[in-house]
Image (tube, rainbow, N blue to C red):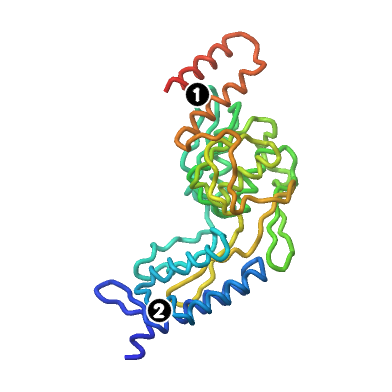
Amino acid sequence: MRLLFAAILVVAGLQTLGPGVIDSTVRGAADAFAANYFDVPLGARVSTELKRRLEAGQYASLPTPQALAARLTGDLFELTHDKHVAVQIRRGVTGAPGPVQRRDVPTTDGFRRTEILPANIALLDMAFFMRPVEHRDAREAAMKILQPADALILDMRQNGGGSPGTVALLLSYLFDEPGRALFEIRPRDGTAQMYATESPGLSMRNGTRAVYVLTSKQSFSGGEGLAFILQDVKRAQVIGEVTAGAANPGRGYPINDTFEITVSNGQLLTSLSHRNWEGTGVAPDIAVPAADALRVAHVRAIDDLLAGMPAGSKRDDLVRIRDRIRGR
């Protein structure tokens, strides 16, 4: 009987929890957090508090793994206000999301839309950033399609983040200088990992073409980071909503056979201002509802192209396109 209650019970497909699993999960989460969180003193305080709550019986009545994961995630956010930190059910366990394949081969996953809009404005809509080895070919193909455009819109409204290396590679197309410092990630030992624009050899760079980044409340982590970095160096106009405010990158650590914890193991800081968007989000230069951001950016890009353009057929065409978009 003790063994039954010390393990996860599966009854009619519904997982329930015994006290042994609750105890090991909370203590394991606390220990993993203390061992890996980038802010060492805060990591220790949070770990101690989780164990105190465990001993006070605050997790004893939670009936399922889903309930325990949700409660621990809520407690961790209450104690840190760090949106990357979370406890999840490990993939493959009943009730968890399906498996995600980690690949070392190219993929177009995450590339939602790549096209030239009317008035020769490029649009790249990405949902997430996979590792450089996975996204390099798709990124290069997308930039080749978008290269002839006179302005570029990067749609991060549904972007959930991902690899900082891929963010740096995408940013490399927007600056003419190879090796330009972009941002750094500082782990708990203080040794910074630096990210810069791609070294010589990257084709299709364009450091002068106007860039616009679309954001929403759902823009998260690397998706909002791309906007923040470009805004920080005045390389792009950000259009849309204030983003989620999750800047500290992290990774998952196993707790036991059922649970894992995502811990922020580094602090990201931009190379120019040494700031980030943790907790505050990225404030747009032009605040509009996310649903309107693409239309507004399209019009703004055309207006910027029209500025200083001499009279003639090209100008007349741009004005007609702009007025048609405005009238939608």
**SS class, disc 1:** loop
Considering depth in this image, is 54 or 85 the residue closer to the camera?
A: 54
- Residue 107: x and y in percent read 50, 50
Viewport quadrant of the N terminus: bottom left
Q: Where is residue 82 drawn, in percent x and y?
A: 57, 60
**x and y, in percent, of residue 134 in the image:** 54, 53
Element at badge 2? loop
Q: Amino acid at mark 1?
A: Pro
Q: Quadrant of the C terminus?
A: top left
User: Which mark sits nearer the N-terminus, 1 or 2?
Assistant: 2
Q: Nearer the viewer, residue 285 or 36?
A: 285
Q: Which residue is mark 1?
A: 118
Q: Residue sitting at 62 percent across and 9 percent down?
A: 311
Q: Which residue is mark 2?
A: 60
* Residue nearest the observer in this picture, 106 or 161: 161
In this view, the residue farthest toward the bottom is 1
Q: Is residue 129 visible?
A: no
Residue at 65%, 11% in the rendered image: 310
Q: Residues within 10 Å of mark 1 (few under 14, many from 20)?
A: few
Q: Residue 102 vs residue 207: left or right? A: left
* Residue most extreme to the top: 312
Is the residue under label 2 in contact with that under label 1 (CB below 8 Å)?
A: no
- Using the image, determine if residue 49 lies above or below residue 284: below
Report which quarter residue 146 is drawn in.
top right
